[in-house]
């Protein structure tokens, strides 16, 4: 693993993580532990993955392997609870991700009156995260500020999933109890970055 992007585990599928652990001389089941730690427990650093043996964590770390969670560079909070994030990527590009608590009451799509739900102790009963799929955009819609940037590059699957994990962690969301919607309405056109977009979607579904 030679460069920063290659050393990031975020965006790897279960099979790819199993291959990584076997490259480090570990049994394949460590791949499941790594997968759960990164995507279910949303652990940000290798050292904190307590299901892995200490010497394995040290070996991964000394080999330059990181989880690779992107950093939150800035937060812009609105009075309605919406938070717009500037997420910093490893190469210095940044993208926008938006947290919208509550939503518009219609996400269930089943006609139910979800507006009467009691808020939980976190202050919301459901939330929507708006995700970016590219840095900049090539589509050039006339009403859109992102269009003025032009296209910088496609995001990797890890950078797409990483936005969601960073925002979930910032709000301490428990996905076992709290309802979450995801929309790809941030920067970029996901179908112009189809392979990475669909890999990220599959990881998030799993
Ligand atoms: S980000 Fe969306 S709205 Fe903006 S130019 Fe691209 S496709 Fe159009």
Image (tube, rainbow, N blue to C red):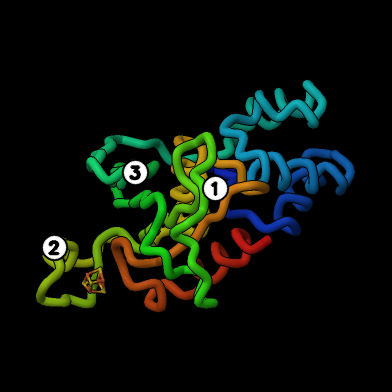
Kindly identify the residue that appears in the image at 85 percent across and 39 percent down. 26
Q: Is residue 100 visible?
A: yes
- Disc 2, disc 3: CB below 8 Å? no
The mark lying in front, picked from 1 and 3, is: 3
Q: Is mark 3 within 8 Å of ligand 1?
A: no
Residue 108: where, in percent of width, then height? Answer: 52, 70
Quadrant field for ligand 1? bottom left
Q: Identify the residue position indicated by label 1 in the image.
A: 6
Q: Which label number is shown at residue 24? A: none
Count neighbours of disc 1 (C-alpha within 10 A) and say few if under 14, some if 14 to 19, many if 20 or more. Answer: few
Q: Earlier in the sequence, mark 1 or mark 3?
A: 1
**Left or right position of 30 against 185:** right
- Disc 1, disc 3: CB below 8 Å? no
Kindly identify the residue that appears in the image at 52 percent across and 71 percent down. 112
Question: Mark 2: which secondary structure?
Answer: loop
Q: Identify the residue position indicated by label 3 in the image.
A: 87
Q: Is mark 2 within 8 Å of ligand 1?
A: yes
Rendered image quadrant of residue 148: bottom left
Rendered image quadrant of residue 110: bottom right
The mark lying in front, picked from 1 and 2, is: 2
Q: Earlier in the sequence, mark 2 or mark 3?
A: 3
**Foreground of the two, 65 or 131:** 131
Q: Is residue 111 above or below residue 132?
A: below
**Left or right position of 206 against 91:** right
Q: CA distance from mark 1 to mark 2?
A: 31 Å
């Amino acid at each position: 693993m030679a460069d920063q992007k290659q050393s990031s585990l975020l965006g790897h599928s279960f099979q790819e993580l199993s291959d990584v652990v076997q490259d480090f001389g570990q049994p394949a089941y460590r791949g499941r532990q790594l997968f759960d730690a990164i995507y279910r427990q949303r652990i940000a650093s290798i050292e904190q993955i307590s299901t892995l043996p200490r010497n394995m964590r040290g070996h991964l770390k000394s080999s330059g392997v990181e989880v690779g969670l992107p950093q939150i560079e800035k937060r812009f909070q609105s009075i309605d609870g919406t938070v717009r994030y500037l997420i910093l990527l490893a190469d210095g590009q940044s993208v926008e991700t938006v947290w919208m608590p509550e939503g518009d009451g219609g996400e269930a799509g089943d006609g139910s009156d979800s507006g009467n739900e009691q808020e939980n102790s976190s202050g919301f009963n459901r939330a929507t995260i708006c995700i970016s799929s590219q840095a900049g955009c090539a589509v050039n819609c006339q009403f859109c500020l992102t269009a003025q940037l032009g296209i910088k590059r496609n995001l990797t699957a890890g950078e797409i999933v990483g936005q969601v994990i960073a925002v979930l962690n910032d709000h301490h969301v428990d996905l076992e109890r709290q309802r979450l919607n995801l929309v790809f309405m941030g920067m970029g056109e996901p179908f112009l970055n189809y392979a990475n977009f669909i890999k990220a979607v599959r990881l998030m579904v799993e």
